[in-house]
Image (cartoon, coloured by chain):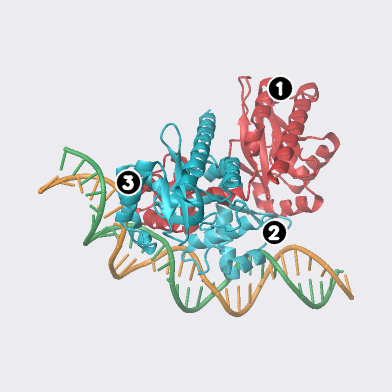
Chain colours: A red, B cyan, C orange, D green
Amino acid sequence: MTSLSAPKGSIARAARVLEVLSLAHDGADLTEIVAQSKFSKTTTFRVLAALREIDYVFQDPATRIYRLGSKLAELSRNSERINVSALAERGMNRLAEMSEDTVFLSVPEGAVSICVNRKVGAFPIRTLTLDKGDRRPLGVGAGSLALYCSLSDEQRAAVCRVNKSWLADYGVTDENLTVEYTFFKENGYARNRGGVVNGMSAIAVPVMTASGRLVAALAIGAINERMEASRINDLILPGLKREARRLAGRFNALEKEQNK
Amino acid sequence: MTSLSAPKGSIARAARVLEVLSLAHDGADLTEIVAQSKFSKTTTFRVLAALREIDYVFQDPATRIYRLGSKLAELSRNSERINVSALAERGMNRLAEMSEDTVFLSVPEGAVSICVNRKVGAFPIRTLTLDKGDRRPLGVGAGSLALYCSLSDEQRAAVCRVNKSWLADYGVTDENLTVEYTFFKENGYARNRGGVVNGMSAIAVPVMTASGRLVAALAIGAINERMEASRINDLILPGLKREARRLAGRFNALEKEQNK
DNA sequence: CAAAAAATTCCGATAAACGGAATTAGCAAG
DNA sequence: CTTGCTAATTCCGTTTATCGGAATTTTTTG
């Protein structure tokens, strides 16, 4: 589960209830939701009543089982129109098979980078620095760095400001970011040299549409021994760039189609 | 806008803020959200802070513009996997062109029927009894009736119990529903004879998968003059049934594919 | 039909949400 | 760099919605 501590505020409580329902693929009755959410029966009931009122959830009249309503799907239809993660499936599999290492896909959201997909290759020592769903400040980790480095000067400055203390948690300073930004501009890819986990490295490239929209970052991580210059330049980087280009193209096509 | 009165409770307030953001396709800043939501600046800010905390919204660090987060899309990915409305587009257009009347698509959700799509035909007198997004108790209107009549005995009973007062608002009694249920069983379609709006009629058929899952209802509405028996039997009903079968097939195929 | 379980309502206590006012931060012009 | 302006954020005393335990009703089960 995401949070072990009790959420503060009705809105956070509502979110927890929604998450419980989202995880219960065939709906859940009140007692089930009480058990999963750890809220009192009364609180759970009241939250569910509020969610019913706004049509975020509905109740099967016969079984009393609660489910998520289509209102939620409608809401998000206006936000994230394209599922980048699904779109990248095949390309990531190709990369994982080719490199035998771990492939990550991250998308930017404000000042944070979200890992939305991961594929592991055949090599027995696996570098699993990110799980699907993990959030990091922009600039921490190869994929997140690639996203950070693809922003404008103003945006990068704003990100640093907003994330200052969060970045500090990872031991990352503005100077580190400047260094990595220079590296990115000179080499066309972002790198992560044991910043988070020692003994492993990763490199990443951004995925941008022709119009310059930053969609995601593709990264490959492995133990240092598998990340020497020749392997990067001959195998990993070309692979990443190829798949990034393909993904950007597919994204662009879908976006055009959706605007009718 | 959906509700004119101020929503009660933090959860409803949060929903309103989310709706404002959903409608503002390129995000909105605090003042914009205040203007749209009609909440005080402080309240809006606090709600946004809570929504940020749970990653339902995020803020562009440079512009301070708020947007809906991908967390919402993730939530609903587990609820409504298939967008029936999008799937029915072509079929509904065919029906609207062929009949020249108005075509409605409704989906069931608990004890309510939601109109999720509508297509108008060429005939100059239009019967627009339902808008996209309108909710009715199961049993009110042709499409809603078709859904109601496709439920099991227990489910129908539960629906009547739950919707008792709401049905009364439309002047619909249990007896009415029993009559229409019998009609449906005998004729294979549901009808609406001026119950809601006088001078128009509609007929509807359910859309069910081979496994018996109730997906939606397809309806065609027109002024009474265009709804005589011969036109129903020769043109409208065959059309509805054909498209319902197609839609069910396409739905089934997609569902199988999604379960890998 | 009785017993048990689940769902829903009640109610006094309390914490959380309220909004106006004050403060701070960001920005543009001088 | 300073100044003035606007938008964003925080403060704080007041109000009110939310809290959870207990009581009640409804539904299910034996």
Type of amino acid at the residue the image marks with label 2: Arg
From what the image shows, is residue B6 above or below residue B203? below
Residue in the picture at 67% in, 41% down: A107
Would residue C25 be found to the left or right of residue B96 on screen? right
Q: Secondary structure at mark 3?
A: helix
Subunit of mark 2? B
For discs 1 and 3, the disc positioned in front in the rendered view: 3
The part of the image, by quadrant, that contains residue A21 is top left
Mark number, residue B64: 2
Image location of residue B100, percent across then percent down = 59, 49
Which mark sits nearer the N-terminus, 2 or 3? 2
From what the image shows, is residue A84 above or below residue B220? above
Q: Which residue is denoted by mark 1 in the rendering?
A: A225
Type of amino acid at the residue the image marks with label 3: Thr
User: What is the crowding at mark 2: few (fewer than 14 residues within 10 Å), some, or many (at least 20)?
Assistant: some
Query: What is the distance, in whole Å, between disc 2 and disc 3 at their CAs?
Result: 59 Å
| Quadrant in which the N terminus of chain B appears | bottom right
Q: Which residue is denoted by mark 3 in the rendering?
A: B182
Please tell me if label 1 and label 2 are on a single chain: no
Image location of residue B78, percent across then percent down = 51, 41
Type of amino acid at the residue the image marks with label 1: Glu
Front-lying residue, A71 or B169 = B169
From what the image shows, is residue A38 above or below residue A237? below
Image location of residue B174, percent across then percent down = 30, 55
Front-lying residue, A12 or A145 = A12
Residue in the picture at 57% in, 41% down: B91
For discs 1 and 2, the disc positioned in front in the rendered view: 2
Subunit of mark 3? B
